[in-house]
Amino acid sequence: MRKIKISWIVLANIVLTFCLLMLGGLVHNTQSSLACPDWPLCYGQVFPKMEGGILIEHSHRLLASSVGFFTILILILNIKFKSSKKIILFSAVSLCLVIMQGILGGITVIYKLPTIVSTFHLGLSLIYFSSLIYLHHLIKFQESHALSHKLDFPVINLRQMLLLSTTMLYLQILLGAFMRHSGDGVACGLGFQHSLLCFDTIKGQNTFWPATLPAQVHLFHRYFACLVFLLNLSVTYFIVKKIKVLRIWMIASNFFLMGQIVLGIWTVASGIAVVPTTLHLLGAALSLAMLIKSNIILNDLSQEKDSEHNLFSDLFSLAKPKLTALVMSTVFIGMILAPNNTSLFKAIWAFLLILMVVMGACVLNCYIERDVDLKMERTKNRSLPAGRLAPDTALFFGLFFTVVPIVLIYLQINTITAVLAFTASLLYLLAYTPMKQRSENAVFVGALPGALPPILGFTAITGKIDLLSGAVYLIMLIWQIPHFFAISLFHSEDYGRAKILTFPNVKGPKFTNYNILLFTVILIFVTFLPYYFGEASRTFYYAALVLGFLFIFLASRGLFSFNSDKDHKTWAHQYFYASIIYLPLLLLALIFFK
């Protein structure tokens, strides 16, 4: 009975905190933030004349004090009635959070509304709000065993999906707070005509991606909101099919998220009027509360322990992190080589979008080859052939992370980068992947899209292809061929079991070694192209010459490595790792000695 009474006090504090969030929104939206220029008093008084901005600002402070008082009371009562250690711990955590909130509020006033502090002030208030929801659950449900039953099936994948959706929503709220406090809320223009598209002050027209950084931040907030909603809708679909008790919470979260999008449009259309702007913040808080409650209930219903594998670890492995890291390093180098200046935000956004395309293509490749992977030792434990992940799930995420970023690249970066990304994905998935079981020459087809990543980085910055980018493409194109020949040598048995046709299995190891040496020599000549095109210095020429000589020396050793199968595979491994070292060194030399 005593615990239930405490739960009612916690519930009252949750309601007060929600009202506090509303008042905080009103303080900012009515420009009353500095109506009381001192802190913690207002013009040196505990109760100043409550009118105008002072009424709103000081009411916010007084309500914050009430929330703090209730938080102290909750901790004292839990200690007095000897609640569980976990409940007492979270009561203390909540108290620490509310104290930190008060300090941040004071810093916000004293230092005249610094954007970062104001943003984190809201962010911390939402964490405190979430901690109260969890504390209420602990007291009312866990202590009374209201959720005594456990699910009879593993839900770790659902838990990870729900946690991702919740985290993205929280980041979206922080981004919105940063946008508003930095003044970027008006960067795309105001009025209904600017509520969907963004007005570019440089071009003088509405656009899907403006040129100025403040407008880019604003529009990114809009696009990210749609992404969060679509993700949460997908997570809801997977959860409500299996867990009835979560249906109302998940459906409510989508209802509030959809309302958030409508309120966001209304906010801009109304010229950032007080009512829609404040409701926009409250809708965000309610959406987050629904997801926090869903996370808590799902965690409480779950009975399985943490597993080595879950949805995200399995999807991450399907994205081939080592290959993706190598590919993205060449994308980054392509961006560095680009001569034009661009905004840091645009460069980071382009990099992330290209990363999504690469990851999505890798997932789709694993989806297409799931039966082939089952036959190979090094891939049979991947999530799809091992049966840990449903093929439809991999297909959904693969398509999502391929199609959506390509569309965004087209809308927000430039057309040529989107076309190249689309072409690379098609060649990789629909030409190279199926061709591997039909012809050993698939390696040459695979090199075509494999050489595009640095060009994607280059065109993302410049919006065009020039002689330098063309030379880099040829270097990447030729480099891949002996690189993959080496891989096929030390994985020849695996490829044979999967009936993947490679040069060692079709034409023999010796023929493959000769081709490794031949294409290594061709590669060295190609590396001189930036110098002959006038895009690199003589120092780069000598660096490429030295690296090339060492690489050819290593390649030639393959002709004398047939004393034993072990020696031959050892050499193939050496060449493989040397090729991974050689390429970054060459490209770094091109950057520093351009």
Image (spheres, grey):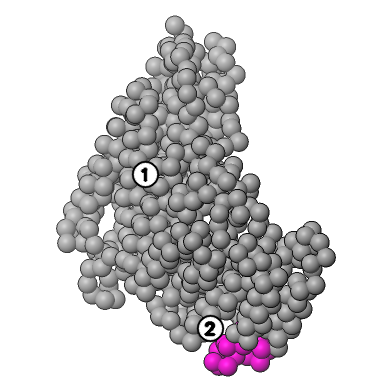
Q: What span is colored magenta in the figure? A: 527-541
Left or right: 57 in relation to 306? left
Q: Which residue is located at x 36 percent, y 57 percent?
A: 403
Q: Quadrant of the C terminus?
A: bottom right
Q: Position of residue 206 (x, y in %)?
A: 22, 68
| Quadrant in which residue 548 is drawn | bottom right
Q: Is residue 526 left or right of residue 39?
A: right
**Neighbours of disc 1 within 10 Å: few (<14), some (14-19), many (20+):** some
Residue annotated with mark 2: 471
On screen, 309 above or below 585? above
Name the residue at 46% across, 71% down: 456
- Give the answer, above or below, for where 516 lies relative to 310: below
Q: Which residue is mark 1?
A: 231
Q: Amino acid at mark 2?
A: Ala
Per the model, the C-alpha gap separating discs 1 and 2 is: 40 Å
Q: Is residue 531 magenta?
A: yes
Q: Nearer the viewer, residue 316 or 60?
A: 316
Q: Is residue 333 visible?
A: yes
Q: Residue furthest right?
A: 563
